[in-house]
Image (tube, rainbow, N blue to C red):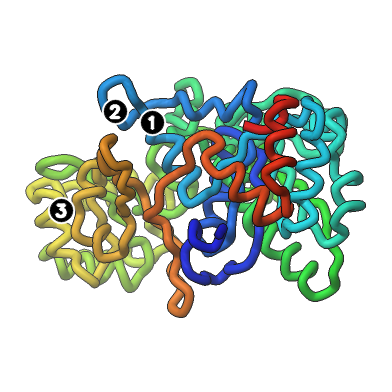
Amino acid sequence: MIDSLVPGPGALGGVVVLDLSRVLAGPYAAQMLADLGATVVKIENPRDPDVSRGFPPYLTDGDEEFSGYYAQYNRGKLGVGLDLAAPGGVETLIDLVRRADILVENFRPGTMDKLGVGYDVLREANPRLVYVAVSGYGQTGSRSRRPAFDNTAQAAGGLWSMNGYPDQPPVRVGVTIGDLSATLFAVVGALAALRHAERTGEGQLVDVAQVDSVLALTETAVVDYTVRGVEAAPAGNEHAWVRPYELFDCADGQVFFGAYTDKLWRASCVLFGSPEVADDPEIDTMRKRFDPEVYAQRVKPLVSAWLAPYTKAELEEMAGDVIPLTAVKTIGEVVDDAGTAERDMIVEADYGSLGTLRMFGQPIKLSATPATPGRVANRFAEHSDVVLTALAGYDAERLGALRASGALS
C-alpha cells in the first residue's frame, strides 16, 4: 500500500529514509533524497511538530492554511506523528529503523541519546543504518553542545567577515548558506555511506556541522591566510584578484561582466567596437589587467563605457555565446525566464482548494532515472497508519494501543 504513495522507481527507489529533522538543513537533505526516488518518512513529535509549518508564505483557503516554506522542503514525504517520550514511542521508532536505510536528524548533539534513540542504540537494531546527524558545530569537539542557527555558522565559519563592502561592517550572506551548505554535504555523505552499507552491510554515522560546511565554502580564504598571512575582507562586488569580474551598471540595471582571460578580453574589445584596445601595451595581458591600479584607471572605466548605453536584454543578446555577460535578475525575472522553464527549475504541486504551489525544482538531472520534485508535502501525521503497517507490520490493535498511550497521532 505504501508503494501507491511514492513515485515509480527513481535512482534511490527502494531506499527508506526516516526524517526526524526540523526546519531546513535536515529536511532539505531528506527532500533531496525523496526527489531522487527514496521513500522518505517525516516523523514529527505531536507535542512539538516541525516549527517550519508556521513559516510564511501560506497557501490559504478560508481559515485553512499551509506553509509554502514547509511544502518546498518536505515535498514527497510521508508523515508520521510519533512522541518518543510516550509509552511505546521509542520501540516504534526502533521498529521503523529496522526497515530503514538512512535516518536524518538535526538536533543538538546528545538529544537523541537522552531520548533513548542515539546512534549506538539504533545501530544495534540495524547495523547497516546510515545515521546522518547535522548540527551547528558537529558531534565532537568542545563546542559541540552550543546552540546554533544559520547565522552562527556564517559567523563562526568566517564567511560573514568576508562579505559586504570595504570600510563598512560585514554583511551576512542573504540566504541561509549555513543550513544550505550543510544540506548538500549531508546528502553527499549519506549517499557515500549508503554505497558502503550496500556493499558491506556496515552502516555508519555521518557527522556534518554547519560551521565546517561554511568554512569549506570560503574558496581561497584559508590558503591566502596560511600561505601569505592575508585575511579575507569584504570586497563588495569585486573578486579578490580576478579582474574584470564584477557588477557593472547598464541602461536599466546591472550586469555581471567576467571577460578576464586574454581570449575573452580580445573578444570583448571586438564585440564593443574597440579592437585596437586588445593590443594596448598597458592592458594587453591578463596579468596587467589584474593589477589593482591599472584596473581602476584603465580597465574598469573602459568596460563601464562599453556597457552603459545598453539594456540588460540588449547586452545579453550581444554577448550571446561569446563572452560571460549576465543580467542581474530579480527572483521574479528568474521564475518567469524561459531558460528556467527549459531546465524544469520551477515545478508545480496541486494542493486542491489551497491552490497550486510553484517552487524550485531539482537541479540534479538524471537521464535514466529523473527526479520527481513536483509533489505535495505531507499534512501532519497524514500517513501514520500506512507507514507503520507497511514498514513495521503493525496491526489495528497495535496502532490503537499506541494512540491510547499518546505515542501515535
CB-based contact (under 8 Å), mark 3 and mark 1 = no
Q: Amino acid at mark 3?
A: Trp
How far across and how far down the image is residue 289, in percent?
Answer: 37, 57
Give the label on residue 229, or none: none
Q: Residue at x 14, y 57 (%)?
A: 315
CA gap, disc 3 and disc 1: 49 Å
Give the label on residue 60, or none: 2
Mark 2: give few (<14), some (14-19) or many (20+) Cα within 10 Å: some
Mark 3: give few (<14), some (14-19) or many (20+) Cα within 10 Å: some
Q: Amino acid at mark 2?
A: Thr
How far across and how far down the image is residue 223, in percent?
Answer: 68, 50
Q: Which quadrant of the view contains residue 213?
A: top right
Which residue is labeled 3 in the image?
A: 306
Q: Residue at x 19, y 64 (%)?
A: 319
Which residue is labeled 1 in the image?
A: 66
Between discs 2 and 1, the one toward the N terminus: 2
Between 254 and 184, the one lying in front of the other is 184
CB-based contact (under 8 Å), mark 2 and mark 1 = yes
Q: Which quadrant of the view contains residue 137?
A: top right
Viewed as shown, does residue 386 lie left or right of 56?
right
Viewed as shown, does residue 161 lie left or right of 308?
right
- Badge 2 marks a residue whose secondary structure is strand
